[in-house]
Amino acid sequence: MAEPPVLPDKAPEPRRRLLSAGARGSLLSILRMAAALAVPIIGFLLLWLTFNFLRDSDANRLLVAVVAIVVGVGGIWLLYWGMDLLVSTVLPARIRESVRPAVFVGPALVILAVYLIYPAINTTILAFKDAKGENWASQGGLGNFIDIFTNSETLVAIRNSLLWVVIVPAASVIIGLAFATLTDKLGRRTESTAKSMIFLPMAISLVGASIVWGFVYSFRSAGFGEQIGLLNGIWTGMGNKPVAWLLQEPWNNLYLMVILIWLQTGFAMVILSAAIKSVPEDLLEAARIDGASEWKVFTRVVLPSIASTVVVVVTTITIVVWKVFDIVFVMTGGRFNTSVVAQRMVKEFFTFRNDGVGAALAVILFIAVIPMMVVNVRKFRQQEETR
């Protein structure tokens, strides 16, 4: 019987298939890397082109707003998603998770450096230069600061800002604390309704609030029509002559402060109400059982328990007060001795074209706000440690 024919060696065939599979894997990896690189690049280019379009003064304003919202949100999401995809595709698994946080925090740090740190450094340097920012100021570079503390108008602005810093946070916190305590005694539905109404002014911008209160303080001289201002309507209805409220020095500063107090009271109330609700009920009941009145329970138990929150609210409102500009600009323009540091700073920059003094005022504001920020950070850390 004849032997069966010897079949050819098939060993090379699996090898050829293995090489083919490896080549396909390499090609797939290259395509994944290309796609991962393409996504953030496309997102960046999309944002860049959108930015150029938004700068076009001839473009339709409604279209500009729509593009800014859609492409701004979508482009940022695409950029971050693409960078995350790039990390997951390109980097080895052992270092992937250590790099990923930097991908998300990195752009924010770059933006802070470009739009916050660099301007702060540049403004500080500019504060020691002349009006045009070309040469160093007189008195060894301190001429701008000397002018600020010797100019009567600037001193009025500093005095007014200090009054704002003392009165507005104190009044906002006291009124907000009173509202928080009283609304806490109401039923759930009534409490939420009352808090919503008190917090509602926070939804209004400072300019919008100034316009609203402009109608409250509105004044027309006798013989120039009926009084449309709320205060003058009430005042003249009682048989008195109309009053130009914003011309009554120095009370006009207090009238302007009322606007910011009206805005910030709701913020203080919400934060302090949450702090009051966190005070243990057992502690309050123990004080009542010991014979303490409600006033003593509030002053001896509640207030010490929420002291750190009160400090945070005060410092937060103080930072807002130091930067107040809109109210004064809209209501009086800084006239009638109502100017504040921020409003004076803008006036020096854009009206007098004195970049040196304007930058010096900005540095003074920055120095004034730093202690408030330090206090806030410390209180937040203390609260985190006690949790």
Image (cartoon, grey):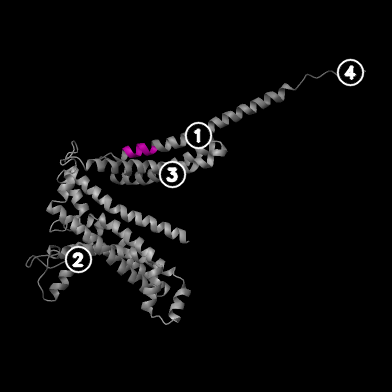
Q: Which comes before the other along the chain, label 3 or label 2?
A: 3
- Res 3 label: 4
* SS class, disc 1: helix
Give the CA separation, mark 3 to mark 1: 22 Å
In this rendering, the label closer to the viewer, 3 or 1: 3
The residue range painted magenta reads: 46-52
Q: Are marks 4 and 3 in contact (CB under 8 Å)?
A: no
Residue at 71 percent of width and 23 percent of height = 13
Give the CA separation, mark 1 to mark 4: 58 Å
User: Which residue, given by chain and number where applicable, does mark 2 sit on?
Assistant: 216
Amino acid on which disc 4 is placed: Glu
Give the CA separation, mark 4 to mark 3: 75 Å
Q: Main secondary structure of the magenta part?
A: helix
Residue at 21 percent of width and 61 percent of height = 163
User: Which residue, given by chain and number where applicable, does mark 3 sit on?
Assistant: 105
* SS class, disc 4: loop
Whether the magenta-drawn stretch holds residue 119 is answered as no
* SS class, disc 2: helix
Give the CA separation, mark 3 to mark 2: 46 Å
Say few, some or many: other residues with alpha carbon within 10 Å of mark 1 (under 14 / 14 to 19 / 20 or more): some
- Res 35 label: 1
Amino acid on which disc 2 is placed: Val
In this rendering, the label closer to the viewer, 4 or 2: 2
- Position of 331 compared to 108: left or right? left
Q: Are marks 2 and 1 in contact (CB under 8 Å)?
A: no
